[in-house]
Amino acid sequence: MAKQHVTATLNGNGVEFLCETRQTLLEVLRDELHLTGTKEGCGSGDCGACSVTVDGRLICSCLMLAVEAQGKSIQTIEGMAAGENLHVLQRKFLEHAALQCGICTPGFLIAARSLLERNPDPTEEQVRYWLAGNLCRCTGYHKIVEAVLDAATEMRGS
């Protein structure tokens, strides 16, 4: 099977890769580009562990073919921190102990960032609704929601 050449922007940097037409974006991110922060939880778009943004849109990377990334801008968990400086959401997840095993955490962080980019002052109900596509098998969601609301407050400067 002939591989396809794809050029995209990944976490703000130009990237090129070869992929088979049947490979998902998740497979290419992890296996070809060695960005293992994006996790595979279900492979069917049901858990949100593989969440990334593509051209600003939150997607499950297990449901997108890598060839569809041609010319697109992709943001993964690896692009969230600025060097050693954690994104405010990452800090708040740590402060609120909003994680356990860590498989779901990157997807929750990407989804939460996507929410706060659209709505910097969400209600608890809005946070819960937005994160409903992300599943955690280890803990309750209360600490995650608290961390997102706390991050939103800090990001607004309130």
Image (cartoon, rainbow, N blue to C red):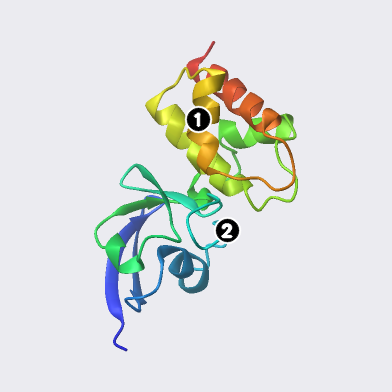
Q: Secondary structure at mark 1?
A: helix
Q: In the rendered image, is residue 82 in sight?
A: no
Is residue 15 found left or right of 132 in the rendered image? Answer: left
**Number of the label disc, if any, that sits on residue 90:** none
Q: What amino acid is at disc 2?
A: Lys
SS of the residue at dot 2?
Answer: loop
The residue at which mark 2 appears reads as 39
Q: The C terminus lies in which quarter of the figure?
A: top right
The dot on residue 129 is: 1
Q: Position of residue 93 (x, y in %)?
A: 66, 34
Q: Residue at x 59, y 38 (%)?
A: 85
Location of residue 105 in the rendering, given as x and y in whole percent from the top left corner: 62, 46
Name the residue: 55% across, 47% down. 107
Residue type of the residue flagged with mark 1: Tyr
Q: Can I make out residue 46 in this image? A: yes
Q: Which quarter of the picture shows residue 38?
A: bottom right
- Mark whose residue sits in front, 2 or 1: 1
Taking 41 as reference, is 122 left or right? left
From mark 2 to mark 1, how far is it between C-alphas?
22 Å
Closer to the chain start, of discs 2 and 1, is 2
Vertical placement of residue 60 versus 127, above or below:
below
